[in-house]
Image: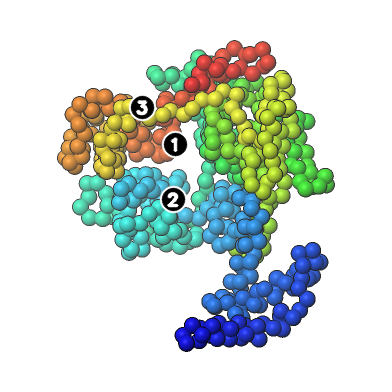
C-alpha cells in the first residue's frame, strides 16, 4: 500500500501545480521568433512565476537584478560586465587616477600584515606610519588571520572618514595608535623619469632615460609628457618606455599617448564598430613632441588594452622597437553606460585595429576573431606583423628567472621566508633611523650581511652554513631592496631593480645599436 500512496501523492501534486498555474499555461506560448513585445511578456511572466511559486522567497528587485546580470553574462564576453556598488567605484577610480583612501601599502608576510610604504600625500605618510610596522588592529578589531582582501575592505573609507589603527614597531614595547583621516589620493600613471646609469652610477655614454607607465588613466599623456620632458632637459635622446603590466584604461588617453610620438596626420588606429557609421579612424592631430628621441617599448603578458593601442601604433609606424614578451591581446573596446547612481554596464562596443589594419585581440569565445597566420600586415618599412595575437615584440626577451642560489635559499627558508623578510625590513628601518643610510646611493656591505645572519640566528631562522657563501648575492639584493624602500619608498625599489632587469638592458642595447637597414635597430643577440 505504501507505493500506491506515494503514487497518489505525486499525481495530486502535479494536479495542484496545474491548477495554480493554469491561467498562465493557457496563454499562447511565445516562440523564439515572436516579436519583441511577446518576448517581453514571456520575460515578465517568467519572473511572476518564479516570484509566486519558487521554493525559496526572492524579492522582485533581486529577481530583476539577477535577470539583468544574467543577460550580460550570457553575452559570453569576458569584457562585458555589470558593475555595481564597490566594483563600479573601484573601476571609476582606476580610470580617473584618483581614489579616497588612507595611503597604507601593506604586504601579507606569513600571518602578519606589514606596512611596506605610504602613498605620498596620504594620511599614512603625514601621520608617520613607517615601513616595517606590523598592523595589529583596525577600529579595534584584531587583524590576526586576515587576508589581503579582508584587510582592504576594513581599511576602505570615504573622504573624511576616520580609521583608527594600531601598529607594532621594532624597538618599541607598546603599540602605536594612529587616527587616519581618509582623503583623495592621486595614483600616478607615469613614474618620475630616470637616467639609466652604469654600475659606477654614471650616465651611459649614449644617454638613455626610462619611464614606467603603469596605467592609462585620465591625465596619463600629460603625466608622461612631464616625465619625458624632464629627462629631455637632462640631455637624454633615447627613451625606454616601460609598459609592462600596464592594464590599459581610457581609450582617449591611449590615443593621446600615441600622438606624442607620431607626426600630424599619421594614423593611430581604427575603432571598428558594428556598422560603418559606428567606425572611427583616429589620426594624430599635432606634430610629435620629441621627433629626435629614439624609443623602445617594454611589454609583457600583462600589457593590455590602451597600452597595446600605444604599442601597436608605434610598432606599425616603425617609431619604436618593442622588447619583452607578447602582450595580453585585448583589442576589444568597451563603453561604460551608467544605469543608476552606483551601477553601470560595461559593454564591448567595437574592436581596435592598429594603423596597418591588424587586430590586437587574441581569439576568445564569443568575439569571433581568428588569428591571421599569413601575416599580411606590415609596418611602414615592410616588416611582417601577425594579426589577432596581441603585440609580439620585435626583440623577444624573457624576464630574469630565479637562479640556483636563490632557489636553494628560498627552499632552505621554507616556512621561515616571511620571518626572513621581516628581519630584513626591521634591519633596513634600523639603518634608516640610525642615519647609517640616508639616501638611495648605498652599497650593501659585508658587515651588513653579517648582521643579517646574526639577526636571523637570533630569531631561530636557520640557513645551512654552506649556503651562506653562495646566497650572499641574493641576500644582498633582498636587503638592498628593503633599505631602498625604507629610505625612498617603492620608486626607490624600482630604481634599484633596474640593475637586474634583463629586459630593460636588452632595450638599452637595442637603442645603442646602429640602425638596421629597415630603420629599426634590432639586436637579437640580447634576446635569450
- Give the secondary structure at mark 3: loop
Q: Position of residue 253 (x, y in %)?
A: 65, 41
Name the residue tied to disc 2: 103
Q: Residue 259 is drawn in which quadrant?
A: top right
Residue occupying image coordinates x 78% and y 31%: 265
| Real-space CA distance between mark 1 and mark 2, rounded to the nearest whole angstrom | 15 Å
| Real-space CA distance between mark 3 and mark 2, rounded to the nearest whole angstrom | 35 Å
Q: Tell me the crowding category of disc 1: few under 14, some 14 to 19, or many 20 or more residues within 10 angstroms, Cα based.
A: few
Residue occupying image coordinates x 30% and y 54%: 167
Name the residue tied to disc 1: 491
| Real-space CA distance between mark 1 and mark 3, rounded to the nearest whole angstrom | 25 Å
Q: Residue 27 is drawn in which quadrant?
A: bottom right
Q: In terms of sequence position, does the residue under pointer 1 or pointer 2 come before the other?
A: 2
Viewer-proximal residue among 486 and 353: 353
- Give the secondary structure at mark 1: helix
Instruction: State how many labels appear.
Output: 3
- Give the secondary structure at mark 2: loop
Q: Tell me the crowding category of disc 2: few under 14, some 14 to 19, or many 20 or more residues within 10 angstroms, Cα based.
A: many
- In this rendering, does residue 442 appear at all? no
Amino acid at each position: 500500500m505504501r507505493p500506491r500512496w506515494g503514487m497518489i501523492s505525486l499525481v495530486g501534486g502535479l494536479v495542484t501545480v496545474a491548477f495554480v498555474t493554469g491561467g498562465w499555461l493557457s496563454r499562447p506560448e511565445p516562440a523564439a521568433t515572436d516579436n519583441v513585445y511577446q518576448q517581453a511578456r514571456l520575460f515578465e511572466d517568467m519572473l511572476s512565476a518564479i516570484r509566486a511559486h519558487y521554493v525559496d522567497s526572492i524579492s522582485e528587485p533581486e529577481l530583476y537584478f539577477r535577470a539583468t546580470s544574467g543577460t550580460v553574462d550570457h553575452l559570453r564576453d569576458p569584457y562585458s560586465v555589470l558593475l555595481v556598488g564597490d566594483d563600479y567605484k573601484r573601476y571609476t577610480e582606476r580610470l580617473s587616477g584618483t581614489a579616497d583612501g588612507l595611503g597604507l601599502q601593506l604586504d601579507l608576510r606569513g600571518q602578519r600584515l606589514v606596512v611596506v610604504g605610504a602613498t605620498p600625500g596620504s594620511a599614512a605618510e603625514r601621520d608617520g606610519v613607517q615601513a616595517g610596522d606590523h598592523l595589529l588592529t583596525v577600529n579595534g578589531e584584531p587583524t590576526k588571520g586576515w587576508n589581503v582582501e579582508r584587510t582592504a575592505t576594513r581599511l576602505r573609507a570615504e573622504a573624511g572618514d576616520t580609521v583608527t589603527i594600531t601598529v607594532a614597531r621594532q624597538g618599541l614595547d607598546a603599540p602605536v595608535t594612529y587616527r587616519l583621516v581618509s582623503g583623495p589620493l592621486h595614483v600616478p600613471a607615469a613614474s618620475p623619469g630616470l637616467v639609466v646609469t652604469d654600475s659606477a652610477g654614471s650616465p651611459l655614454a649614449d644617454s638613455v632615460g626610462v619611464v614606467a607607465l603603469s596605467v592609462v588613466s585620465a591625465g596619463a599623456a600629460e603625466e608622461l609628457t612631464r616625465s619625458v620632458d624632464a629627462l629631455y632637459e637632462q640631455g637624454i635622446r633615447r627613451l625606454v618606455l616601460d609598459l609592462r603590466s600596464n592594464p590599459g584604461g581610457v581609450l582617449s588617453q591611449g590615443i593621446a599617448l600615441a600622438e606624442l610620438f607620431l607626426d600630424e596626420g599619421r594614423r593611430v588606429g581604427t575603432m571598428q564598430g558594428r556598422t560603418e557609421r559606428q567606425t572611427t579612424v583616429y589620426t594624430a592631430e599635432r606634430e610629435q613632441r620629441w621627433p629626435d628621441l629614439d624609443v623602445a617599448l617594454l611589454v609583457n603578458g600583462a600589457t593590455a588594452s590602451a597600452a597595446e593601442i600605444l604599442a601597436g601604433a608605434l610598432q606599425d609606424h616603425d617609431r619604436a622597437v618593442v622588447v619583452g614578451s607578447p602582450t595580453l591581446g585585448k583589442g576589444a573596446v568597451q563603453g561604460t553606460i551608467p544605469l543608476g547612481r552606483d551601477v553601470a554596464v560595461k559593454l564591448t562596443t567595437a574592436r581596435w585595429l592598429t594603423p596597418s589594419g591588424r587586430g590586437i585581440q587574441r581569439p576568445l569565445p564569443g568575439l569571433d576573431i581568428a588569428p591571421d597566420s599569413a601575416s599580411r600586415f606590415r609596418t611602414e618599412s615592410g616588416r611582417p606583423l601577425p594579426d589577432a595575437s596581441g603585440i609580439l615584440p620585435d626583440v623577444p626577451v624573457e624576464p630574469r628567472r630565479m637562479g640556483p642560489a636563490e632557489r636553494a635559499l628560498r627552499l632552505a627558508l621554507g616556512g621561515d621566508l616571511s620571518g626572513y623578510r621581516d628581519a630584513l625590513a626591521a634591519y633596513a628601518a634600523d639603518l634608516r633611523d640610525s642615519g647609517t643610510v640616508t639616501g638611495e646611493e648605498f652599497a650593501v656591505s659585508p658587515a651588513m650581511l653579517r648582521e643579517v645572519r646574526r639577526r636571523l640566528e637570533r630569531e631561530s631562522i636557520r640557513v645551512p652554513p654552506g649556503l651562506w657563501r653562495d646566497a650572499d648575492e641574493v641576500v644582498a639584493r633582498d636587503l638592498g631592496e628593503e633599505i631602498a624602500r625604507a629610505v625612498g619608498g617603492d620608486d626607490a625599489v624600482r630604481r634599484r631593480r633596474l640593475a637586474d632587469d634583463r629586459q630593460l638592458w636588452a632595450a638599452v642595447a637595442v637603442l645603442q645599436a646602429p640602425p638596421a637597414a629597415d630603420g629599426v635597430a634590432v639586436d637579437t643577440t640580447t634576446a635569450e
